[in-house]
Amino acid sequence: MRPIDPDKREKILKSVYTLTGKRGLASVNISGISKTAGIAAGTLYIYFKNKEEVVQLAYAAVEDKMTHAMYSGFDINAPVRQSLKQIYINMLNYRLKNYDETVFIDQYVQSGYIQINFSKQLAEYEKQNKPLYDLLEKGKQEGIIKAVDAIILISFFDGAVRSCSTGIIQKLFPLNQKLIDDCFDMVWRGMI
């Protein structure tokens, strides 16, 4: 049996993001993945059983990277607003620097793929994002954050970051500190 090359595996996953960024998740297929990755279709099957497995693992990989980036510099002991703004900025920066990955994530969560292992994915999401859940709970206990289910607050927060990054990428408005501050202030006011 041929040894698994982690670089090839990563190239395969990156090709899923690239294809999604260019043509959308619905257009991703084995032929396109292998061509974009620069490997034979048969080689792809050494690493993955089928397209669904590639897409599922691509999601898990990018979710891990994005989550890690979200909590860079995070301090639960800092004031709630300051901590939440740090997460906002980290998410925005990640989305702006990794466009294809974020297009993939956005389309994945709106597709039928999310339903394949939904309970497992939700449990993993909650585990990975425990710092955000804890921060929101801290804000609620301090009477700063609305007493709303955390998943609703997170969905609202995530949607705001997504909209801001999309507007910047589409050149609807320029990226500058005032924009970041104004957008975060609107999110903050919506959560308090």
Image (cartoon, grey):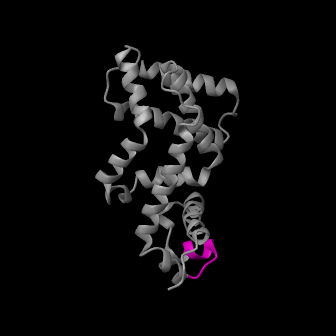
Measured from the top left, where is residue 3 in percent x and y? 54, 79
Q: Residue at x 43, y 27 (%)?
A: 135
| Dominant secondary-structure state across the stretch colored magenta | helix
Q: Residue at x 45, y 64 (%)?
A: 55
Nearer-the-camera pick, 103 or 85: 85
Q: Residue at x 47, y 18 (%)?
A: 189
- Seen as rendered, the residue at the extreme left is 119
Image position of 189 with respect to 8: above or below: above
Nearer-the-camera pick, 58 or 128: 128
Q: Is residue 114 left or right of residue 37?
A: left
Q: Is residue 172 left or right of residue 104?
A: right
Measured from the top left, where is residue 104 in percent x and y? 51, 55
User: Magenta stretch: residue 185 in it?
Assistant: no
The span picked out in magenta is: 32-40
Give the quadrant of residue 41. bottom right
Give the quadrant of residue 150. top left
